[in-house]
Amino acid sequence: MTGRKHKKAERAGRVLSVASEFAPLVKTGGLADVVGALPSALAAEGWQVRTLLPAYPGLLDRLVSPKVVWSSDDLFGVEARIVAGKLDKSDGAPGLLLLDAQQFFAREGSIYLGKDGRDWPDNPTRFAALSFIAAEIAHAGLSDRWRPDILHAHDWQAGLAPTYLKQRGTRGVATVMTIHNIAFQGLAPATLMGRLRLPQSRFNRDGFEFWGKISALKAGLMDADWITTVSPTYVDELATPAFGMGLDGVIRLRGDRFSGILNGVDLNVWNPRKDRSIAYRYGPRKLDDKRGNTDALAGEFKLEISEGPLFGVVSRLTRQKGLDLLLDTLPELVERGGRLVVLGSGDADLEEGFVEAASRNPDHVAVHIGYDEALSHRIFAGADCILVPSRFEPCGLTQMYALRYGALPLVARTGGLADTVIDANDAAIKAGVATGIQFSPTTAEALSAAIGRMFDLYGKPALWRRMQERAMKHPVGWSESAKAYAALYESLLDESELL
């Protein structure tokens, strides 16, 4: 302990958030959106957040008022510095800390993959360096006299940060590890222990060893003071072999220090009343203009103007996301008069399958392989229904965007999908609370039945409109989640003061 005192009524807690992605600077998935939204959400609860992020190409040029606050000529053998700054002149204290280590991060293309589409061979070292510096900041602070009260690590890329801090000495800083997706675990050969400055004594079942390899994620799960994940349902799922990806035993072991806090979305960015990416802006009381977006989207992709619903997919095209099931059921969807617009990329066979489906049904199916942020907004605004048939989904943001835009979500009953969409069963319809459709098990047959239910609902215009209005009013922002994080941070600081 450092002797620093925290009084709840007076303290403005400091959080160091450590991650490999941060929207709007760099994004490959929902992790970036969450990490990017947390600082402003937590500021409303009195917490100052600085986010430590690798200085990928071009990021340093985006900083306003940059200042070097740490430097070394030996970060795992390379020169490195931390540059503090902010994205907007109107911001208060600098919120970003960019780790400028050119040998690790000054690479064109994907932040994780080389030109051959495979992981960079030195990914374990690159992100261990990020974790190592996070621990250094937590232990010793920066040259501008900033030091956090909480070190919050996100996913495997920051998983070693709690371990390094334990080695270095916590000095009263509490650690939180958040699992966004347990499928990615940061595995590395045991021969890298020396290179990564990890102690041989922790290479065991109670440390970071996982089937003879180093697991950065397991390190964080074992050494963090508290673990969170991104939905309450995913907490329970992770403790089972079906969802735990080999780490379910660790999850059960740490179960009394583990909680689920649902993600939220940025209500300013995802707002159909103000969205400049869409053809017609609208709200719950101005839903007729949503139809204009539907027709505009159909026109953009040269789909026929139809009386049937327009379905949308904005997703990675992978089996985890259940998109192979959609391919299996697509002929029935088209036969019933439905249309489909797909935006995403992923597994080559699924990309090919959707492209072929579009070529066979050009009036009913359209596909854009890749990612386009503005197009994603147009799909949410234009779709009548957004499909999210994931086999597992820790939280999911897609269904929240869909709710916000009145595109009723059709989701698998798993993880955060189950926590955010209220199934339109008879009881929910009678109670006036339904916002979409859930289905289970995650099979083509169950998905087909759920799509049939969606067609039936669409055929009842008054009920459909009520569900759209309810969906758009459903709370999907960060307010409640930020309160939950703030309460967790407070409790961890209270614990540290008792040590």
Image: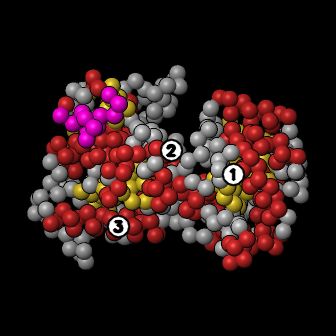
The reply, left or right, for residue 224 in relation to residue 452 is left
Tags 2 and 1 touching, CB below 8 Å: no
Decide: few, some or many residues near mark 1? Use Cα within 10 Å; few <14, some 14-19, many ≥20.
many
Mark identifier at residue 492: none
Residue type at mark 2 is Ala
Q: Which residue is mark 1?
A: 387
Give the percent coordinates (x, y) of residue 67: 28, 47
Q: Earlier in the sequence, mark 2 or mark 1?
A: 2
Q: So how many labels did they put on this image?
A: 3
Check the image and report above or below for 116 versus 415: above
Q: In this view of the protein, which residue sits in the foreground, 63 or 346?
A: 346
Classified by dominant secondary structure, the portion drawn in magenta counts as: loop
Magenta region: 201-212
Task: Residue at 55%, 50% (x, y): give it.
Answer: 393
Q: Quadrant of residue 6?
A: bottom left
Q: Which residue is mark 2?
A: 242
Give the percent coordinates (x, y) of residue 243: 49, 45
Q: Which residue is mark 3?
A: 486
Q: Nearer the viewer, mark 3 or mark 1?
A: 1
Check the image and report above or below for 205 versus 297: above
Dot 2: element? helix
Q: Earlier in the sequence, mark 3 or mark 2?
A: 2
